Each structure stands twice: as structure tokens, then as C-alpha cells.
Amino acid sequence: MANVKEIQDRMKSIRDTMKITNAMYMISSSKMKRAKKALADTEPYFYGMQAAISRILRHVPDIEHRYFDERPEKKGNERRIGHIVVTADKGLAGAYNHNVLKMAEDQILEPGQHSLYVLGELGRQYFMKRQMEDVDLDVDFRYTVQKPSMHRARMIGERMVYEFLEGNLDEIHIIYTSMESAVSVETQTLQLLPLKKRTFDSGHQAEVPMDVHHEEIMLFPSADAVLDSIVPNYVVGTIYGCLVESYSSEQNARMTAMESSTRNAKEMLKSLSIQYNRARQAAITQEITEVISGAKAQKNKH
């Protein structure tokens, strides 16, 4: 059994760690609330753009546009596929990063010439160390995932739209984590480009809030010109939503991990407290025994 001093030192170390885990829990909770509020504030605008694209397709169903070009002539390994992978800048978030990296690895096993655009320092370091020969990792694609902003989403969106229109990429996907509820997150993949017309059908379209105004529209100067203006902003809005969802999911995962760590620390303290009391009792008993033995020895001398 460890002595009293060793147990005391270990209990102090655990209490100090508990202060850190509690602080991290509170910080993550605050960050998640701010991120969710920012997303809620901007959602109506992007829902409006989604509805506008849907109305254009409803009025001009046979339109052929470059953002809807699926390039069917390129098949199998000829297709160049880009993946935006949203990870975290640091760990201590349970299985959050592992799930994203696993889905990314599964995706690049599919037929095609794959390119990775990794967000988050942890994911970037992971793929740089792997050095996959058949996968092109853009090492200059460096963006943090902390405090998602529209400016960052626009920079990423403009780059992806450029790569698609120039023919450098035939498909662009984003791998992110969606926060289904306060206790459930899910890693997902979403195709950004090319757009699919069926995505904007009323049966497949995301549920639009009731307070989003559905005004009548005029296509001026043409439907093509309107889509040229709307689609890049729609892509930016989708990326921004994915960044905020991932950031919120990361904070939620970290909250859960820190809560679990704090709970385990309390259990360890409870167990150590019992050990401490036993060790202390044993030490007291030993001291009493030594005193009695000493007294007997002195008595026998006389």
C-alpha cells in the first residue's frame, strides 16, 4: 500500500486536473453557443438562395449550366475528385477527429484521382505523415477551424469554384461533422459541386423556415447570369454552415470528453480517499504500537 504522502500528492494532482477539465468544459460550452447563434443568424439568407435556385429550376427545368455539369464523359479513375476535410486544430475531443479521418480515408479508396484540402492542424499533420502516393495533399491549403467566419468560407469557396470551373476538379465534396443533438454528432460527406438538380426538388430540399420570404422573381438578364451570381454564394454559404456545424460538434465532443474525465476523476478521488484513510489509520496504529512497545520495554528494564 502507498504511504500517506504519496496518496496525498496523487489526490492533489487529480484535483488540479479536475480544475482544468472543468474549465475546458465551460469554455467549450460557451464557444458552441456562440457558433450556433452565428449560424442561426445567417441561415435565412442561405435558405433564401437555395429557394431561389429551386425556383429558377422550376421555371427553367431544361437549363444547362456549368455548375450542374456532371461531366459524364469522365468515368472511374479519370475523374478528379477534391475533398475538403474539416478536422480540429487539437485533440481532447473524444472520437471527433478519428471519425472524420476514417471517413476521408474511406472516400479516397473509391475510384478516381483524389485531392485533399484539409482544414485543421491535426488532420493536416495526420495526412502529411502518411505521405500517400496516389493522393494529392494541398499543403498550402492552410486554414484554421477556430471561430468560423464568412470571410474564411468565402476564401475556401472561391478557391473550390475556381478549381471546378477550370476543370482541375470534376467533383468537390466536403467531409464534416453535423451536430444532430446535444448528445449525438454524425460525420457526413456532402457534394458541393457539381450541383444536382434533384437536390433542389421540393421533395429533397432542406426544410426552409417559415419566416423566409418567398417573393416572385424576375430572371434578368438571363437565368444563366442569375445562376452565375447565386451559385458561388450558395457554395460559400454551404461551406460556412459545414464549418460552424463541425466547430459546434467539436466543442460538444470536447464537452462530453471533459465531463467524462471529471466524472472519472471524482471516482478516482473517492477510491484514493478510502486508501488515504486506511493508510492514515494504519500509520496511527503503527505509531500507537511503537509507543506501547517502547513503554513495555522501559517497564521491563525497571
Image (spheres, grey):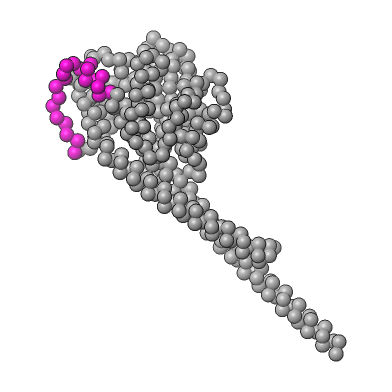
- Quarter of the figure with the N terminus: bottom right
Residue at (53% x, 19% y) in the render: 134
| In this rendering, position of residue 72 left or right of residue 268 | left
Which is nearer the eye, 61 or 276? Answer: 276
Residue at (49% x, 26% y) in the render: 139
Query: What percent of the width, then of the height, locates residue 207?
Result: 26, 34
Residue segment shown in magenta: 211-231
Magenta stretch: residue 228 in it? yes
Vertical placement of residue 206 versus 183, above or below: above
**Quarter assignment of residue 193:** top left
Query: What percent of the width, then of the height, locates residue 132?
Result: 55, 23
Residue at (30% x, 41% y) in the render: 38
Residue at (57% x, 61% y) in the render: 12
**Quarter assignment of residue 208:** top left
Vertical placement of residue 62 versus 292, above or below: above
Query: What percent of the width, then of the height, locates residue 11?
Result: 58, 61
**Quarter assignment of residue 143:** top left
Q: Judge whether residue 84 can be spotted in this image.
A: yes
Query: What percent of the width, then of the height, locates residue 280?
Result: 65, 70
| In this rendering, position of residue 262 left or right of residue 60 | right
Query: Extreme top residue here?
Result: 73
Q: Judge whether residue 263 can be spotted in this image.
A: no
